[in-house]
Amino acid sequence: MKKRVVITGLGVVSPIGIGVGEFWKAALAGDCGISAVPAFDSLPMEAYRSRVVGRVRNFNPATYLDSAQAERLDRYAQFGLVAAKEAITDAALRMDQEAPYRVGVIVGAGMGAMTLGERELTKLYLELKPNRVPPNFIPAITMNSVSGLIALAHGAKGPNYTISTACSSSAHAIGQALVAIRTAQADVVIVVGADASITPLVLAGFGSLRALSTRYNDDPRRASRPFDRGRDGFVLGEGAGALILESLPHARKRRARIYAEVAGYAATSEAYNMVIPREDGAEMAATMSLALRDARLAPAQVDYVNAHATSTIRGDEVEIRGIRRLLKTRASKVVVSATKSMIGHTLGAAGSLGAVATTMAIQSGLVHPTINYEDPDPECQLPGIAAKPQERRIKVALVNAFGFGSNNSSLVLKRYD
């Protein structure tokens, strides 16, 4: 019998709130965290195709971190540390009472330290002083910097690594934490997804890929609109989500509050295209099916899907086709919502933030709305998608995250009984 794994702590840094309480209150209210992109120094902003982003507002690193971390670390690392600290506190996890080699850290990151990297590269070419590159530059921009920093901050000496699979990174991080606990590599895993890539180069790159919304530059709050007929691309977001996963016996032993159970996980590759998914949704359906099989659950038991739903034309259509293919008649009865409608696409943090939202939905019996769902696209329409919060007792939920490189991930979360 597979070892049961539960969620005991949550942490959030997002465009609609810092802290789980603020995030969830804003999500249920349908608040929008999308705004105009801040100016990039002397760059002509009118040259950017997309000028809307989901930026974390009022984030002062000095409020949460020591002076060295506030000054020297990349923004995504700061987000990750803050979210992890909140989750550890929320879980009442006392590291001085834990066996350090039994506590792991697994991070999902899509782009990494782009803010710091772009800044130092620009300075190098403008000032022509290679000897002035900060000595901490290399360890700060390595993709595993956040997992290392979290381990250092909390004394976690168990498995420590970073997964980078673009937009599915942190969903895989949660899945691999599940595997690590099931296989007795750890009793507890601190899981974090983080990204902060609202930078001149990244925004320009996604613009050249024609993946971003351009129609709503003058009305940013309407730009992210999954499943709506008026959608025209995703909105680049930033943030971090953290979850504390632990074995059920360990959680019971320390009398931890249990939010939900992580019951299943699947990882697949469509082996189809680096950017676009296969049109019929068969591969996404297969991934969800494998996750349910891992959880020993049937499609007919699914109550809720936290969709990947980026607000791209093809991506949203294909995901709904996958849901219909998997759930068949059940598809008309499940609740489906898109967290990205409010915060944009946070890249490597998307899976963890979706998992936090799903965990809170299971706990509260409330599902946040999909905002800007005004003119449903017939190709994406399901009765369970709504622009208002929905009340629903959720026993079984799917969390989807699909990334560049034909990379698919699905998680199964369920009510803890």
Image (cartoon, rainbow, N blue to C red):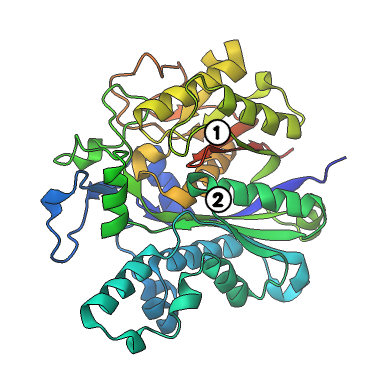
| Contact (Cβ within 8 Å) of mark 1 with mark 2 | no
- From the top left corner, tell me how far across and down residue 264 is, in percent: 70, 38
Taking the spot 75% from the left edge, 34% from the top edge, the residue there is: 294
Q: Secondary structure at mark 1?
A: loop
Q: Amino acid at mark 1?
A: Gly
Residue labelled with disc 2: 170
103 is higher (above) or lower (below) than 11 = below
Residue type (three-letter) at the residue carrying disc 2: Ser
What is the secondary structure assignment of the residue under circle 2? Answer: helix
At label 1, counting other C-alpha atoms closer than 10 Å, the crowd grade (few under 14, some 14-19, many 20 or more) is some
Q: Is residue 173 above or below residue 342?
A: below
Q: Give the labeled residue for mark 1.
A: 365
Measuring from the top left, give residue 384's x and y in whole percent: 47, 20
Residue 404 versus residue 307: which sits nearer the camera?
Answer: 404
Give the number of the mark in front: 1 or 2: 2
Query: Could you say which is closer to the camera, residue 66 or residue 288?
Result: 288
**Which sits earlier in the primary sequence, circle 1 or circle 2?**
2
Q: Which percent across, then down, holds residue 36?
A: 20, 49
Q: Relative to residue 83, is residue 310 depicted above or below?
A: above
The foreground one among 299 and 383 is: 299
Residue 57 x/y as whole percent: 30, 58
Label 2 CA crowd tier, 10 Å (few <14, some 14–19, many 20+): many
In this orientation, does residue 13 appear? no
How many numbered tags mark residues here?
2
Q: Residue furthest bottom?
A: 131
Left or right? Give the position of 54 relative to 409: left
Q: Is residue 167 visible?
A: yes
